[in-house]
Amino acid sequence: MVRTVSPNVTAGPTLAVVAREAGVSVPTASKVVNGREDVAPDTRRRVTEALDRLGYVRRPRFDASKPPRLVDLVVHSLDSSWSGAVLHGVEQAAHEAGLDVVVSAGLGRSVRGDRPQRGWLDKLTTRGSAGVLFNLAELTDSQYAWLEQHRIPYVMIDPAHEPPPGAVSVGAANWQGGVSATEHLLALGHERIAVIAGRRRKQCSNARVAGYRSALAAAGLPQRPEYIRYGSFEESTARQRMRELLDLPEPPTAVFVCSDHMALGVYEALAERGLRVPHDISVVGFDDLPESRWASPGLTTVRQPLGEMAATALRLLVRMMDGERPEGTRTELSTRLVVRASTAAPRVRTHA
């Protein structure tokens, strides 16, 4: 039987130790501890025996007699549907864990546009934050060192760059998403497929382009350098990159755009030239934000589960706050293609 005791009692083995003893993953062991039904009987038996054998002590998730613990969520901005999806996921998971969340748009107020200010980090200890979630953040080495020095656990949600060794992060299967988007266009009969990506140095951008390259290679098609365009994740930049593609001697018949927000800029560039989606050119986005459903025509896109990513990050952070250490440092959630009305077979052209 799993015991539940006061947080003041010295903890026994962690859930990771129990999982290793039972030969299962930590999430599976957690399901057994929390009474979930979606566990095979034999697996439940092995985990239960390991719990009893090791004397695992279950920590109470929330003590209503004490003030809730605080965690910080740092987002790049508060004016996007992306941030809204992240906020929603964190809020739900925090409510289940009995936590309060302090939200900061730290990236927008920094001297360098994408890095939180040092003064903001100092406030963490002042207000007693027990942990931090960073969304799309780019931290300096000194800021990572500050967090480690003050023993403040943190989890990165879709980090801009490869985090330092040992840092825990949650993201989407960006490479597979790039493959899926490109394979969809190939299946429709497109061969002249371009990609418009975000900044070249962004981890997610590079992974999506790598997936695009892999799908073309698997189909036996050459990669045309002029069809690969980088910029930023801004609508205006994507609009300009699409104009450049249309000005090529042989423009593409389809384009994979590495974010839904950018895809709206592509729509605008095509409308400027009197071109119709998907009659003249097919468009695939990435994210599955509400904008993709509101666009006309509805945008075919790759869905990354932003809310689930945020909730997963919060749950990992809670475990770290309780002294556990996740088995792996990178958690990737699957992406899937959502087909709407912006893709079709290429139109037969009589001239380039």
Image (cartoon, rainbow, N blue to C red):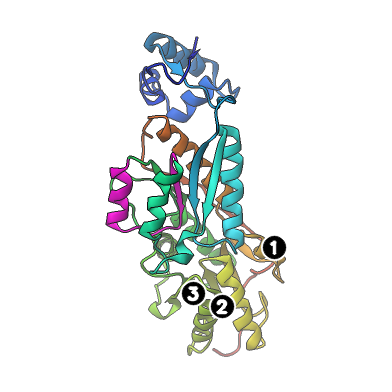
**Going from the N terminus, do you reach mark 2 or mark 1 first?**
2
Callout 1: SS: helix
Crowd class of label 1 (few under 14; some 14 to 19; many from 20; radius 10 Å):
some
The amino acid marked with disc number 1 is Arg
Q: Nearer the viewer, mark 2 or mark 3?
A: 3
Q: Residue 125 in the image: x percent, y percent?
A: 39, 44
Observer-nearest of 252 and 41:
41
Q: Residue 215 in the image: x percent, y percent?
A: 45, 62
Q: Nearer the viewer, mark 2 or mark 1?
A: 1
Q: Residue 121 in the image: x percent, y percent?
A: 39, 52
Q: Nearer the viewer, mark 3 or mark 1?
A: 1
Query: How far apart, in angstroms, are the residues tagged by discs 2 and 1?
Result: 22 Å
Q: Write the start and end of the magenta stretch as one range.
A: 129-150
**Going from the N terminus, do you reach mark 2 or mark 3 first?**
3
Q: Which mark is on residue 194?
A: 3
Q: Which mark is on residue 293?
A: 1
Q: Residue 19 in the image: x percent, y percent?
A: 40, 23
Query: How far apart, in angstroms, are the residues tagged by discs 2 and 3?
Result: 8 Å
> Vertically, is 100 above or below 15?
below
Please name the residue shown 47% across and 30% down the image: 27
The answer to whether residue 133 is magenta is yes
The amino acid marked with disc number 2 is Thr
Residue ID for mark 2: 253
